Image (cartoon, rainbow, N blue to C red):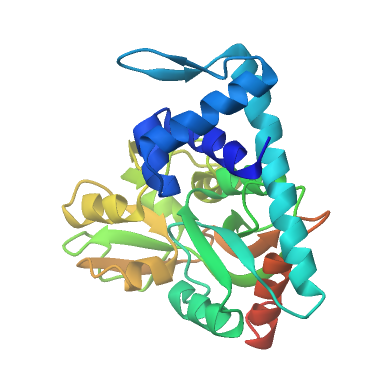
Amino acid sequence: MELQQLRYVVEVADTLSFTRAAERCFVTQSALSHQIASLEREIGRRLFVRSSRSVRLSEAGQAFVEHARIALRAAERAKEDAAAVDGVVEGTLRMGVIPTVTAIDVPAVLVAYRAAHPRVRVELQVGNSDVLTRRLRKDELDIALLGLRDGVDPVGVASRALSRERLVAVFPQRHELALRNSIELEDIAGMTFADFPAATSGRAQSDAAFAAAGLTRDVAFEADSATLILGLVESGLAVSLLAPGTVERSGFEVATADVRDGPVRVEYLAWDIAAPRNVARAFVAVMEAADLVT
């Protein structure tokens, strides 16, 4: 049993396609199929159920692939730790980012990180804070940039605060409140809102603020994308509450107002609390050197 065979199994399990797995592994499909067939003969079990139209994991394959992932991660960490003896940071940094991050310039930070550690490959994924936190806890990510409502800290991970800001109300340019510099939640409670999906951390920020004020609101439009939310606002279909930096960088023609009793969002840098990888510790160090964490 070889590590390369385990990599092939994991790729097929992830793509459910021998063709796509071979492309991702930069080998021919016949070579990949041969190696998986050899592994199946060695362990005496079929790992995949194949047909002319589909590929799926067998019951044995489902059990095998989880251990294969663990073995590959262990091998990667062994290589990283060996390099660390000589002061070299190498490997792959798996980074998760919320789509509305404003506390840092992500590309600029990654440029600085790669300059300090050129042997590290960076993989970037975008998602909401709840999903990214779960993936950190499951060792599927090394670093994540999160956004949570004030008073709610990331659970089960190590974290450092990056910024704290109050959300602003966002209106169509011709809205009746568009010329106001500041408002209160009561002023917009009866309006139609566009917001992030219910039960997500992005939505919880505004929901908690309205609940604390004893107010209700109508969220008619739910979207994972701040871009879509701002498009709905610009078109006159809704109002919203968003981080000021998200609005400023968007380029949408909308109006904003401070909300005196509005929700506050805290952005965090988070990583594995138990045994962070060298690539993650190096990223935290780059952030600290740039004085970006508190």
Q: Is residue 152 visible?
A: no
Query: Residue 280 at x, y = what percent?
Result: 69, 66
Identified at 47% across, 63% down, the residue is: 167
Q: Which is more toward the observer, 290 or 199?
A: 290
Q: Residue at x 33, y 60 (%)?
A: 170
> Horizontal and vertical percent for residue 173?
19, 65
Q: Where, by quadrant of the figure, is residue 165 drawn?
A: bottom right
Query: Residue 86 or 288: which is nearer the viewer?
Result: 86
Q: Which image quarter is the C terminus in?
A: bottom right
Residue 269 x %, y %: 64, 65
For image coordinates 62% across by 87% down, the residue present is 290
Left or right, residue 73 beside residue 183? right
On the picture, is 58 further left or further right than 191? right
* Residue 245 in the figure: left or right of residue 171: right
Residue 84 or residue 271, whichever sits in front: 84
Q: Nearer the viewer, residue 186 or 290?
A: 290
- Is residue 251 visible from the viewing direction of this image? yes
In the displayed structure, would residue 84 be above or below residue 133?
A: below
- Name the residue located 58 percent from the left edge and 37 percent from the top edge: 5
Q: Considering the image in quadrants, where does the N terminus appear?
A: top right
Q: Give above or below for 237 relative to 81.
A: above
